[in-house]
Image (tube, coloured by chain):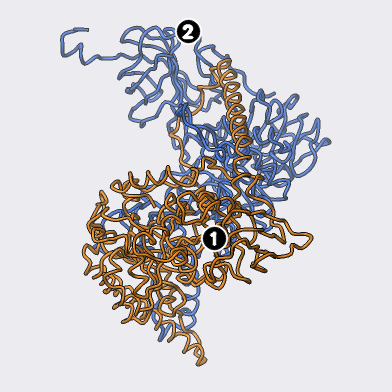
Chain colours: A blue, B orange
Amino acid sequence: MGRRSVQPRLWAFVLLGVWTGFLAARTAWGQGGEPRTFAIRGAKVVPVSSAPLENATVVVSRGIITAVGTNITIPPDAWVIDGKGLTVYPGLIDGFTDVGVAAASSTAPSGDAGARQQPGISRGPEDRPATTPWRNAADEVNPADPRVESWRMAGFTTVIAAPKGGMFPGQAAVLDLGGERAGDFVVKSPVAVPVSLQAPGGFRSFPGSVMGGIAYVRQVWLDTNWDIQANAIYEKNLRGVERPKYDRSDAALAAAIGKHAVVLLPGNTSLQIRRALRLTEEWKLNAVLYGAQMGYDVAPEIVARKMPVLVDLKWPEAEKDSDPEATPSLRTLRFRDRAPSSPAALNKAGVKFAFYSGGISAPKDLLPAVKKSIDAGLSPESALRALTLSPAEIFGVADTLGSIENGKIANLVVTDGDLFDKKTRVKLVFVDGRKYEVREVLRPTEPPKGDLTGKWKLSFTTPQGQEEATADLSMQTDGTLTGSVTSDRGTGTLFSGWVSGEKFSFTINIAIEGSSSDVVFTGTFEGTSMKGSIQAMGSTFEFSGTKPTRMAAQAGGAQ
Amino acid sequence: MKLRPSTLCFAAAFLFAAVGVLNANEKPASSASMDAPAPVILIRNATILTVSHGTIDKGDILIKDGKIAAVGGTLKAPANAVVIDATGQFVTPGIIDCHSHIAVDGSVNEGSVSVSSMVNILDVLNSDDVAIYRDLAGGVTTANVLHGSANSIGGQTVVIKLRWGQPAASLPFEGALPGIKFALGENPKRSNFRVNGAPERYPATRMGVEETIRGAFTEARDYKKSWDDYNKRIAAGEKNVIPPRRNLKLDPLVEVLEGKRYVHAHCYREDEILMLLRVAKEFGFRVQTLQHVLEGYKVADEIAAAGTGASTFSDWWAYKVEAYDAIPYNAALMTRRGVLVSINSDDAAEATHLNQEAAKSIRYGGLTHDEALKLVTLNPAIQLGIEKRVGSIDVGKDADLAIYNHDPLSAYAVVQKTLIDGRVYFDREKEQAARPALEKERKDLLEKAKKKQDEEKKAGAKKPEEKKTGEKKPEEKKPEEMPKPPQGEADLGGAR
């Protein structure tokens, strides 16, 4: 394959970067300076929309798939990747998440609350508690979200992302997980309006119960419909009719529904799923169910209502470190046992379903979770479809996403084997036709000799001149490093870091020239001094560091 | 609803005495109590307590398609009939609990506001609540599921049949008028608890409770008028009229004004009882039942004159100041003054022995055997407007029956079978026979889960590098995990 080789070091992280000149103005994004036309030749291609092809070629040009097949002429300007031993899948889609979206600023009641109102206390539906439907993932893309990369490296090129928090958190958009500016991420917006029935208020603030949450959402839909109806009448007859009051929530929901955004309603147990089905009918929504882990119990009812479903991949299980004496009920045990069989049951019944990450926070757990549903009876083909074409269909983007077809967006995952095999590694990911290589994390071999914990002063010389940074590190006994590095360029949190013997390595991701970049520190340490090298965007330069111990300074060296 | 600490011991005593405490907190997937309904059933050779027309010694009941087809001496069993031999046993109408909080998903209180009429128990019926099954084991077939008492005007309520194993949508009693919960006195004015971090909620006095109810109905009257006006203008052919906005808080109050929804009012003291009857008269609606109504005996004539029912406890009192003047003669005294009286549970454990609760009115107040039994059968049926369907053993009524091994008003009585719509939903023998299989299934599942866990651990131990490379991010909460309301608050808000 055509990947640039880098000497892997046993103890360090390997960054497969392409040199573009540290801090130089960048003319391209992704990993920089690459051609815009690729051909993966001689690979197994799984288009999803049609049967898999052996020894086939996929051509990608300027973000679009331009050819797929076994008898393809490779354009002369293409960067050719030898696909021998590789399998090409459509980029995977996470059906519902907040990956790539900035954290919520506030979910306080937002309606026309008067001055009498205490902050955070809602006195009824009119205060619009925990309701921010005017927010939109497309407007709040956060390219620096470290999950953008970690999801992508796990094979997910696309997410249906929504702001998080509250009962109407905001509108969801289809985002491709790659790009320089926030706007590069957005494929389509809005595509969905997620609803939560999780009542935030307790006895303090409305709504504080499940039934209160339902009553609240019901009132909001009534108000939204009224808003549409009243404004239509008003616009026809501006004089002599009292002006309908503007309500930001109603207006935003009316606009989203008008753009054919689907409504996401929660329902995980059969009780909740049946409730969601009933409410969908009552509220006349074009709705998609999310949760659905007890789908094995109610699949025929779901298909009877033709409701598409998003299945939460965080399967129910006993809590880690749960009370060993605790005796879960038989119902709970059955649920834990059978939940992964829900996708198979839904599939068999003919329900259109897709997977979403739900409660899973580590992307490496996503495909193993899918594998559990395959072990429980779902065919691998159906599982793949539920990660690609089905979510694209559910959210109305199947014209451009979800399969490897001519003219579709070039979102691809290239692996060295079957996607669901435990041993398979993701080798390359294409997002909008840009190539991302997967860095592999290597591990320390020795226990740490000493403790790196503390505030280190680092100094180094870049093409810009002498610079300084502060590394605030914290080491665990096994050598795991956490912490952050702060300099004039900003603060980056360590997303990985290790100490092995007297060697160490840690990596941060910060925005350099507006593009998120990995910066890898490797070196050796002894006592309160360290030295080593920094790798960033293909450049390497030396650094040294010291740990001034305040104790030593103040107490005259008493240790 | 959970009891207050002061009544906890008292209730615990009942719990253990309760009809063979049921451990099977599981829904029997395909076992005993979920027999497919037989089209024809003959209950043979039982003592039949019809409630409406006396007792039949050694009689038969013929059930066809879920209805009682014949009651009498010896009936001829059709060829296809399933025969239940009830020799030496007693059949009563299924018990009706006029005040229940079982089968609710989440809190029974929307405790945030003083008027929570926008919420509806119907939205959150929980068919998986094991209390349904335990109620069945106590002979209960119908329950009036109420919102809690945290608000002057509470949520909308629903009458259900305890069809254990059926989805929530199959629980509501077909055709039964919906209700709404009101609450007077200490609970809505929050005398006995405070909510940390929340401003003190209006009202804080009994005067305020009255004003809150009055205010809500004044609003509802205006709201109704705005709709009436709108409909008139539309009927007159006007175009381009913006309709009033639907208000889910006021809709059910309009239904009360129109006689389409029953008011079930939680109350204790005579003064607040009279207050509510006055307010109802002023706004032109009837209070269908007074709930708890521990001082009802003091104003029984006024209650009777208002045509209002009373649903009370047999002998629970003194758990708070407003419950100090209660006496166990309450049910009997009100009955003698012409009030339609029922005995209710308000509590999942109490509900399993309502037959014994009814029996206490024979000892305290001298009700007759039939009068006592009516307190938990025909009377609550009338109070809920479902007496044409249930409440007595009469031809044409629903075959909702409880079969006891002794006279149900005896302390030795234990339910053997409970039928709803002619279908056996609880069968003591089958229940007990099914337990070992359920226990085995639980054990197997536990072992299976443990085995899987061990395997994953082993796999993890081999490759520690895989285990630790994941991003560290705080666990996300699943949207389905509803936050439990602060425990103390929830307990107090709905307490009797």
Residue at (41%, 15%) from the top-left corner?
A: A542
Query: Which disc number belongs to residue B304?
Result: none
- Tell which tag, 1 or 2, sits nearer the viewer: 1
Task: Check the image and report above or below for A310 versus B378.
Answer: above
Q: Nearer the viewer, residue A234 or A432?
A: A234
Q: What is the tally of numbered marks visible in this picture? A: 2
Find the residue positioned furthest to the right. Answer: A71
Task: Check the image and report above or below for B349 versus A424.
Answer: below
Dot 1: chain letter = B
What percent of the width, then of the height, locates residue B406?
53, 52
Helix, strand or loop under label 2: loop
Task: Check the image and report above or below for A142 versus A260.
Answer: above
What percent of the width, then of the height, locates residue A349?
72, 49
Q: Nearer the viewer, residue A475 or B212?
A: B212
The answer to whether any part of residue A181 appears in the image is no
Q: Quadrant of the C terminus of chain B?
A: bottom left
Tag 2 residue? A446
Q: Which amino acid does label 2 sit on?
A: Glu
Q: Nearer the viewer, residue A463 or B65?
A: B65
Dot 2: chain letter = A
The answer to whether any part of residue B418 appears in the image is yes
Q: Which of B385 and B279 is in front in this view?
A: B385
What percent of the width, then of the height, locates residue A224?
47, 67
Q: What residue type is labelled 1?
A: Gly
Residue at (46%, 53%) from the top-left corner?
A: B410
Asked which quadrant contains residue A185, the reply is top right
Query: Could you tell whether B337 is left or right of B466 in the image?
Result: left
Tell me if mark 1 has few (under 14), some (14-19) or many (20+) residues whose alpha carbon lies within 10 angstroms of its own.
many
What percent of the width, then of the height, locates residue A288?
59, 54
Helix, strand or loop under label 1: loop
Tag 1 residue? B94
Q: Mark 1 and mark 2, same subunit?
A: no
